[in-house]
Image: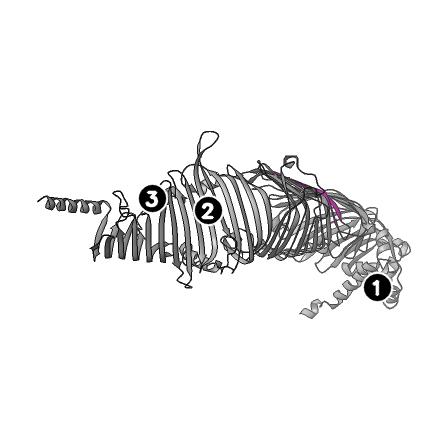
């Protein structure tokens, strides 16, 4: 009866144990018991928990009675012929918020391991980065002691891809707070990788508990790197991501000794660690480095850390990097993306000092290095120089006697395109946690073969940057404040723009800029001789302001404006006098551009079309504001203008105001407009005109025009006279051109004298008594009345309806004689003929001849009917 009760109790306890362990299945077959132990032919266990599902199938299980214990694990010596394990994480299980490794907890279950465990063949289906991965091999584990826990481990793992065998040998010693681990890896019995790891709980000087994490990794002859990479990639890399094949050989080593905050080892802890790390690598063939690319060459370095601040104690590198990772390339502008980078870092003897002085903050704590970087890709970059790195806190780095060379075939930025870029910068620099300083030295320059934009292009640009300095304040580690100042010079062999002719341009000046305000000051000159002093400023609040004061232009020496401006009037030539000009441009945020241009000339002489002029002196101001143009002529005098008849002096004062989109339809206001003509004066009254009107009237007043001067200029044989003429000429301007209707002129009392002694008129009078009387009368005609209606059409035809009243004392005792005479003359042709008969410049003569030829080729009104 007691045995039955014990059996029932044992069965109930066993079921309760299975339920607590969440074991849903526990089956075995082929049970046998002997003096050596218990044997099971097969064993199947299924465990279902919240975190994972576990299936175990074992064959040939032996549980030896030797060293049997009443505490777990009960059997201290276990052997299995084969073991199949399928472990699958539950998708609904919460994931860890951050990667952290608690080594003591991770290796804690080994305390429950038996004194010896031997598995002759095992297959494990486990989670990995690619979903599910298979692990095959054998395993032998032995405990060498219990306090502290000491375990030796040997496992042979089969590589499914290549059929090779990976052997792992390990030794573990663990106490409650400490851990020592040694691992060695072989591939087909060839040693490949070895490592040690130690974790100690220590009390620092302040009495706080810290983790001391130390270790070393060595691979002096890593000849099976490809095998290791293939095996590890399936566990560490997600599906679809493949690394380039690892090289056939390499030599790697690393050791570290770090003090960490208590708790599981995490990235955050490592970032705040204190201690030291040393590493070296010899990669005779390109080696794939995740996040970097393929790396080839030699590297050795030693770093010290204090609370996460890493400082270099030793650096030596001779590396070539190819096929840079996309994650690294994507952070760079297109022009800086590289296909290949060569990096050389070599220690420098302390006595080999460069020319520049060392920063005081680095004295006595600097690690001197010589660096050389060559980058080939969209742009080619070369940097070499002396670098001094702080080897104690606070960190600092200084660059001396450095030279940066860069060239690129093409650089595209928005709609700007630069071709043939070549830069050479000789520089010194310094940086620490608070500041950044860069000084460009002699020989620093930037050259661009061609710079173009839809409305602009320039060739052979050169920027000289000697003496340019950059200072910046750093703030974790962004630039919170910066300043650039120093001399700067630009030149272009040819600059083309819609308003400018192609020629060379040069600028020499200084720049002073910071995050709030930028200014530029210097001298600008062109190949044609145009010179200006420029001053420009820009700020976020005030916008851009540019002032230009042009050097006085002496037109006797040439006309730089004509050689600079595409819109210079083709018919205007200046050969004497001088011009002063200044300009001010403002571009305020949220407002229209404001432009002011002051022009002052003195004694300008030259030719406009077929009119020569001299003595032009003016004070004029042009302004552009609120999308309107205003031109004000404060004073203008012209000594003489000669379109065929001399005019002058001419005086003018007035202004013009118009919207930019309709410049020809503004408001014209004249305060003064007078011209001396043939001894008299032509005046336009002070008035305002709205040029939007289709027909404009300009009422001209003539006073005191001297007939003697008129007849002296008029190319009619035998014509002379005297008297003064007054009148009014209503000049109309419209789309057809210039015209006059119902104009009136008359002689001043008491009149004057006309003399017309012409052989052709006398010949006509020989056969016509009426013409004879007219000819005789006009040989000496004393008039008391001379008046005429005046009309002028857009084709240039002048019609005078002339009335004369007077007498010839030699005819019939001076009896009164009245004449009504209609005179018609083409004024442009008349003026052209006068000019050809006079001594004029070759330019005027050529233009007059072209004008006459053009008029002859035009069809007459009869031809068009």
Q: Residue at x 62, y 45 (%)?
A: 628
Residue 522 magenta-drawn?
yes
Q: Residues within 10 Å of mark 3 (few under 14, many from 20)?
A: some
Q: Which residues are magenta?
A: 514-533
Q: Is residue 384 above or below residue 395?
A: below
Residue 770 shows which numbered tag? Answer: 1
Which element type, helix, strand or loop, lies under badge 1? Answer: helix
Q: Position of residue 263 (x, y in %)?
A: 40, 38
Left or right of 77: which side holds 699? Answer: right
Q: Position of residue 56 (x, y in %)?
A: 27, 54
Is residue 753 at all visible to an observer of this figure?
no
Distance in Å between CA atoms under marks 2 and 3: 20 Å
Residue 515 appears left or right of 836: left
Q: Which residue is disc 2 drawn over?
A: 196
Q: Which of the two discs, 1 and 3, sits closer to the camera?
A: 3
Indicate which disc, 2 or 3, sits on the residue closer to the N terminus.
3
Question: Helix or strand or loop: what does disc 2 sit on?
Answer: strand
Above or below, 206 against 503 in this view is: above
Calculate the distance from the C-alpha at mark 1 to the C-alpha at mark 2. Answer: 141 Å
Q: Magenta stretch mostly in which secondary structure?
A: strand
* Mark 1 vs 2: CB contact within 8 A: no
> In whole angstroms, how far apart are the C-alphas of marks 1 and 3?
152 Å
Secondary structure at numbered mark 3: helix
Near mark 1 (Cα within 10 A), the count class, few <14, some 14-19 or many ≥20, is: few
As drawn, the residue found furthest toward the top would be 206
Q: Which residue is mark 3?
A: 111
Displayed quadrant of residue 137: bottom left
Is-magenta flag for residue 276?
no
Looking at the picture, how far across and down is residue 332, in whole percent? 55, 51
* Image-quadrant location for residue 44: bottom left
Q: Is residue 521 visible?
A: yes
Mark 1 vs mark 2, foreground winner is 2
């Amino acid at each position: 009866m007691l045995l039955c009760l014990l059996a029932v109790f044992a069965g109930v306890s066993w079921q309760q144990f299975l339920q607590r362990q969440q074991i849903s299945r526990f089956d075995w077959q082929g049970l046998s018991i002997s003096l050596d132990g218990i044997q099971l032919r097969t064993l199947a266990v299924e465990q279902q928990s919240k975190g994972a599902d576990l299936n175990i199938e074992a064959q040939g299980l032996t549980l030896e009675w030797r060293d049997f214990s009443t505490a777990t694990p009960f059997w201290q010596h276990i052997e299995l012929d084969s073991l199949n394990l399928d472990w699958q994480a539950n998708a609904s299980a919460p994931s860890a918020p951050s990667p952290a490794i608690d080594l003591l907890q991770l290796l804690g279950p080994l305390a429950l391991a038996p004194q010896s465990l031997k598995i002759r063949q095992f297959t494990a289906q486990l989670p990995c980065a690619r979903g599910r991965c298979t692990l095959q091999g054998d395993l032998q584990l032995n405990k060498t002691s219990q306090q502290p826990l000491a375990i030796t481990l040997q496992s042979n793992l089969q590589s499914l891809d290549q059929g090779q065998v990976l052997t792992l040998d390990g030794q573990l010693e663990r106490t409650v707070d400490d851990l020592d681990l040694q691992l060695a890896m072989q591939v087909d019995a060839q040693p490949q990788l070895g490592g040690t790891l130690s974790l100690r709980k220590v009390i620092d000087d302040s009495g706080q508990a810290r983790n001391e994490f130390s270790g070393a990794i060595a691979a002096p002859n890593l000849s099976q790197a490809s095998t290791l990479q293939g095996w590890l990639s399936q566990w560490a890399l997600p599906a679809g991501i493949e690394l380039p094949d690892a090289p056939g050989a390499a030599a790697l080593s690393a050791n570290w000794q770090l003090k960490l905050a208590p708790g599981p080892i995490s990235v955050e802890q490592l970032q705040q660690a204190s201690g030291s790390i040393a590493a070296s690598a010899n990669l005779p063939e390109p080696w794939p480095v995740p996040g970097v690319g393929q790396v080839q060459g030699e590297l050795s370095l030693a770093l010290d850390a204090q609370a996460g601040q890493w400082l270099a104690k030793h650096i030596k590198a001779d590396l070539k990097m190819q096929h840079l990772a996309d994650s690294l390339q994507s952070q760079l502008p297109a022009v800086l993306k590289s296909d290949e980078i060569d990096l050389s870092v070599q220690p420098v003897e302390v006595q080999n000092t460069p020319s520049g002085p060392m920063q005081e903050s680095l004295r006595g704590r600097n690690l001197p290095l010589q660096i050389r970087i060559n980058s080939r890709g969209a742009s080619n970059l070369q940097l070499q120089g002396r670098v001094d790195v702080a080897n104690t806190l606070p960190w600092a780095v200084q660059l001396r006697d450095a030279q940066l060379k860069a060239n690129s075939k093409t650089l595209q930025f928005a709609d700007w395109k630069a071709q043939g870029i070549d830069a050479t910068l000789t520089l010194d620099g310094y940086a620490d946690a608070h500041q950044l300083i860069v000084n460009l030295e002699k020989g620093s320059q930037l050259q661009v073969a061609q710079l173009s934009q839809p409305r602009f292009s320039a060739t052979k640009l050169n920027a000289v940057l000697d003496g340019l300095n950059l200072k910046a304040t750093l703030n974790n580690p962004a630039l919170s404040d910066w300043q650039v100042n120093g001399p700067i010079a630009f030149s272009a062999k040819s600059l083309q723009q819609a308003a400018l002719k192609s020629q060379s341009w040069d600028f020499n000046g200084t720049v002073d800029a910071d995050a709030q305000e930028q200014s530029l000051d210097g001298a600008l000159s062109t190949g044609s001789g145009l010179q200006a002093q420029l001053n420009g400023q820009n700020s976020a609040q005030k916008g851009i302001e540019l002032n230009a004061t042009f050097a006085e232009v002496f037109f006797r020496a040439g006309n730089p404006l004509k050689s600079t401006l595409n819109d210079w009037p083709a018919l205007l030539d200046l050969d004497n006098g001088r011009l002063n000009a200044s300009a001010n441009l403002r571009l305020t945020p949220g407002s229209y551009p404001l432009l002011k241009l002051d022009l002052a000339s003195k004694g300008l002489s030259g030719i406009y079309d077929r009119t020569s002029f001299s003595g032009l002196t003016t004070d004029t101001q042009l302004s552009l504001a609120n999308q309107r143009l205003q031109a004000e002529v404060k004073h203008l005098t012209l000594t003489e203008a000669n379109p065929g008849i001399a005019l002058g002096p001419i005086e003018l004062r007035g202004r013009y105001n118009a919207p930019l989109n309709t410049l020809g339809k503004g408001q014209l206001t004249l305060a003064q407009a007078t011209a001396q003509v043939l001894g008299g004066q032509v005046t336009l009254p002070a008035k305002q005109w709205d040029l939007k009107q289709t027909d404009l009237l300009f009422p001209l007043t003539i006073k005191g025009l001297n007939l003697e001067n008129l007849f002296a200029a008029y190319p009619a044989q035998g014509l002379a006279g005297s008297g003064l003429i007054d009148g009014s000429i209503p000049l109309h301007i419209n789309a057809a051109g210039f015209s006059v209707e119902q104009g009136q002129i008359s002689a001043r009392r008491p009149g004057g004298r006309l003399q017309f002694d012409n052989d052709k008129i006398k010949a006509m009078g020989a056969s016509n008594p009426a013409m004879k009387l007219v000819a005789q009368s006009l040989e000496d005609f004393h008039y008391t009345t001379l008046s005429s209606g005046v009309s002028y059409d857009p084709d240039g035809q002048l019609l005078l309806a002339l009335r004369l009243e007077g007498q010839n004392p030699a005819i019939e005792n001076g009896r009164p004689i009245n004449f009504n005479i209609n005179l018609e003359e083409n004024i442009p042709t008349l003026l052209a003929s006068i000019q050809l008969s006079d001594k004029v410049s070759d330019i005027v003569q050529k233009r007059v001849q072209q004008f006459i030829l053009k008029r002859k080729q035009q069809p007459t009104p009869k031809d068009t009917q």
